[in-house]
Image: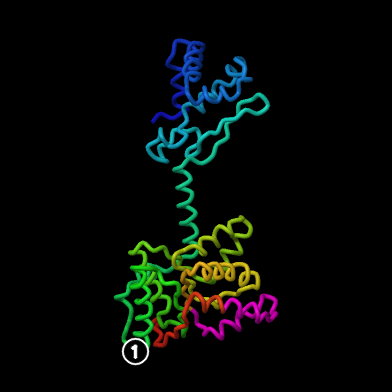
Amino acid sequence: MESIQSALSRWMKGKESFQHSMQQMRKEVLSSKDVQAFLKEHPEITEEQINKQLIKLYEYDVSSKACEKCTSLEQCRNVVQGYVPEISLENKRIKLRYHECPRQEKHLEDLEKHKFVQSLHMPREIHEATFDQIYLNEEARLDVFAQVKSFFDQAQNDLPSKGLFLYGKFGVGKTYMLAALANALAELKVDTYFIYMPELVREMKASINDSTINQKIDRFKNASVLILDDIGAEFSSAWFRDEVLGAILQYRMMERLPVFFTSNYSPEELESILSKSGKGDYEQLKAARIMERINQVSKPVEVIGENYRN
């Protein structure tokens, strides 16, 4: 599709005279349904104003307003790629304001999602984790795996309302087991957010400045399955504990949406950690409230075994 700039150049060069070109352009622009509708809304616009601002009317007329004249975002014909004009009249002057077209909106959403996932990046082996690669050479791990697999089996019919709180020493496979679950759920088209908690703390603090924090919290609230990896490892302030973690868990508890956790701390140890704010104050009641929510959305399971990272 020819761009607006190319069309204007053709108009200026392809006719016998500039005046003839402008008259022809005026005739075509004023016959446009979109332009006619705008002029009908503003009968106060004079012929002189139309002549002086004909180029703006032309730009509005030939623009692709709903991607109908473009084959792709890359082939957008508009003056500003991915943006469509909205016409208005202000102080007797025709104004064009541009906003995202449907394809650009989708593109920006994808970029934001990709950017956000990058900020919570998981190692490649986590993305490739599968059930059949989980080591099941210890009886204790067999029991944990059975509970993880049971959740997946139930999810094929109806998503359970409770996840698991997997706790144990470093390297026993807690994260890998839940990554395998997330990848298996993806095959069922169940959306899962897998979040590394220390990175989440940094992400939320950074989001205060760009006003996206509520949008991101809503994503975690509404994900079908939420996995919070390594809870307790981050330096958590009272603000993050109450306004971010508390808000997410409260919503998911009320909506009966499952949450999975991994931690190097038992629930009792985690409660002690959460009772300490960034200032060193003890707020046991607030920490107990968080743990109550954790208990409502997950079941504690200890993972015992050797350190597979070694």
Would you say 187 lies left or right of 162 here?
Answer: left
Question: Picture coordinates of residue 69 (x, y %)?
Answer: 41, 33
Q: What colour scheme was applied to this rendering of the protein?
A: rainbow
Magenta stretch: includes residue 143: no
| Residue tagged 1 | 139
Q: Does the magenta stretch include residue 265?
A: yes
Residue 38: x %, y % from top left: 55, 25
The disc labelled 1 sits on which kind of residue? Glu
Decide if residue 260 is on the left or right side of residue 214. Answer: left
Instruction: Say how many tags the image has.
Output: 1
Tell me which residue sits at (66%, 24%) in the image: 92
Q: In which quarter of the image is residue 188?
A: bottom left
Instruction: Give the camera-side residue of 11 and 217.
Output: 217
Please tell me which residue is depicted at 37% across the width and 70% down the height of the picture.
Answer: 125
From the image, which quarter does the C terminus lie in? Answer: bottom left
Q: Which residue is located at x 42 percent, y 16 percent?
A: 14
Pick out the residue farthest to the left: 132
Which contiguous range is marked in magenta?
263-291
Q: Is residue 197 above or below residue 102?
A: below
| Quarter of the image with the N terminus in it | top left
* Residue 244: x %, y % from top left: 59, 67
Classify mark 1: helix, strand or loop.
helix
> Label 1 neighbourhood size at 10 Å, few (<14), some (14-19), many (20+)?
few
- Residue furthest bottom as drawn: 139
In the image, is residue 199 above or below residue 37?
Answer: below
